[in-house]
């Protein structure tokens, strides 16, 4: 769950603070004059931005699939679900715990905290406060806080004991003059886990798939847990070796092989929309490891 702030600083669950792709805001005549252009991550973006609206205003919107060409199955839900605030998501998790008698956790990612801080919106402090109010106060709480900005995680750690996870994006390190990958021993000073792009865990250019890098092992040796970022079934999101014969970006590729490769790499967890597939893949890897040990006599 990605989090962005409203005008008054409330946190809402949206992948991006520009809302026209993922809600019906562009079709609302009463909000037409609120369209604007901002510089986001160095690029000019035009649209309607969460931080320009109150929570009450955003609660009138309905969600839609932001990439219908890639996930056409989700398009049928357009206009049926309201936009959720963080408090709504936490309540859903608590209700799920009661309904299923299982622990239902929340993974909350702060999007662009430095950008919003510059606008007077303290998303780090707001998240820490909201989690404390909701009873999420200990390292054992069923919640992780994610961010790609180390400073945000450091600040959060001064306000809350909830576990933190550094998001490591491949695109942020492609430029040879850009930032280097973080030193894992340094990460351990402000986070308990990392969640890297899959291309940093499995070499997508290798002749034979999978070809694990050493990142997961190195992170574990540094005392960090490792979680993969979202594994999706569509060709557009899969390594070339796992894409289906149907070359369309929305066609389903070999997600099972990707999930098995990630769990075989020793990951502690995988984010995915296909939870059932992930559970089967994890069991397959556990069974294979147990069988191998049995053959070796223990």
Image: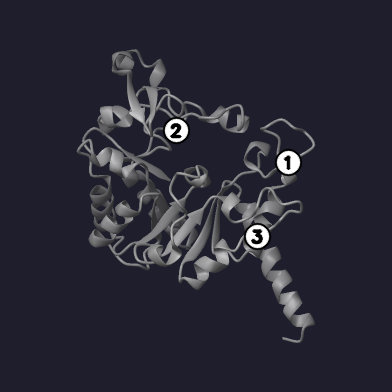
Q: Which mark is residue 265?
A: none
Report whether 204 appears left or right of 36: right
Report the mark closest to the observer, 3 or 1: 3
Nearer the observer, 72 or 268: 268
Where residue 221 sits: x, y (%)? 51, 72
**Mark closer to the chain start, 1 or 2:** 2
- Residue drawn at (35%, 41%), measured in percent from left and top? 112
Q: How many marks?
A: 3
Q: Which mark is residue 212?
A: 3
Where residue 206 sits: x, y (%)? 71, 52
Nearer the observer, 44 or 289: 44
Where residue 241 sits: x, y (%)? 74, 46
Residue bearing mark 1: 243
Report whether 65 appears left or right of 286: left
Q: Residues within 10 Å of mark 2 (few under 14, many from 20)?
A: few
- Residue drawn at (28%, 61%), measured in percent from left and top? 157
145 above or below 214?
A: above
Q: Label 3 to label 2, Cα distance in Å?
A: 39 Å
The local secondary structure at tag 1 comes to loop
Residue bearing mark 2: 81
Q: Label 1 to label 2, Cα distance in Å?
A: 31 Å
């Amino acid at each position: 769950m990605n989090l962005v702030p409203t005008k008054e600083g409330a946190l809402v669950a949206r992948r991006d603070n520009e809302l026209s792709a993922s809600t019906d805001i562009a079709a609302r005549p009463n909000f037409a004059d609120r369209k604007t252009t901002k510089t986001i991550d160095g690029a000019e973006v035009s649209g309607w931005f969460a931080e320009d609206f109150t929570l009450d205003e955003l609660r009138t919107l309905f969600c839609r699939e932001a990439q219908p060409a890639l996930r056409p199955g989700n398009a049928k839900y357009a206009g049926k679900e309201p936009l959720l605030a963080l408090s709504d998501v936490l309540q859903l998790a608590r209700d799920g715990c009661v309904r299923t008698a299982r622990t239902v956790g929340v993974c909350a990612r702060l999007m662009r905290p430095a950008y919003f801080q510059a606008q007077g919106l303290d998303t780090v402090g707001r998240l820490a406060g909201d989690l404390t109010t909701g009873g999420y106060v200990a390292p054992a709480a069923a919640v992780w806080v994610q961010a790609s900005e180390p400073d945000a995680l450091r600040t959060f750690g001064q306000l809350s004991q909830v576990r933190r996870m550094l998001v490591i994006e491949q695109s942020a390190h492609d430029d040879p003059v850009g930032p280097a990958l973080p030193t894992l021993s340094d990460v351990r000073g402000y986070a308990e886990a990392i969640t890297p792009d899959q291309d940093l865990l499995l070499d997508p250019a290798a002749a034979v798939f999978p070809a694990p890098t050493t990142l997961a092992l190195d992170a574990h040796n540094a005392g960090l847990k490792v979680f993969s970022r979202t594994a999706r079934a569509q060709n557009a999101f899969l390594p070339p070796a796992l894409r289906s014969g149907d070359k369309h970006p929305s066609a389903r590729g070999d997600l099972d092989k990707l999930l098995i490769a990630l769990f075989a790499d020793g990951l502690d967890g995988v984010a995915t929309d296909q939870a059932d597939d992930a559970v089967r893949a994890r069991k397959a890897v556990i069974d294979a490891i147990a069988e191998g040990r049995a053959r070796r006599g223990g």
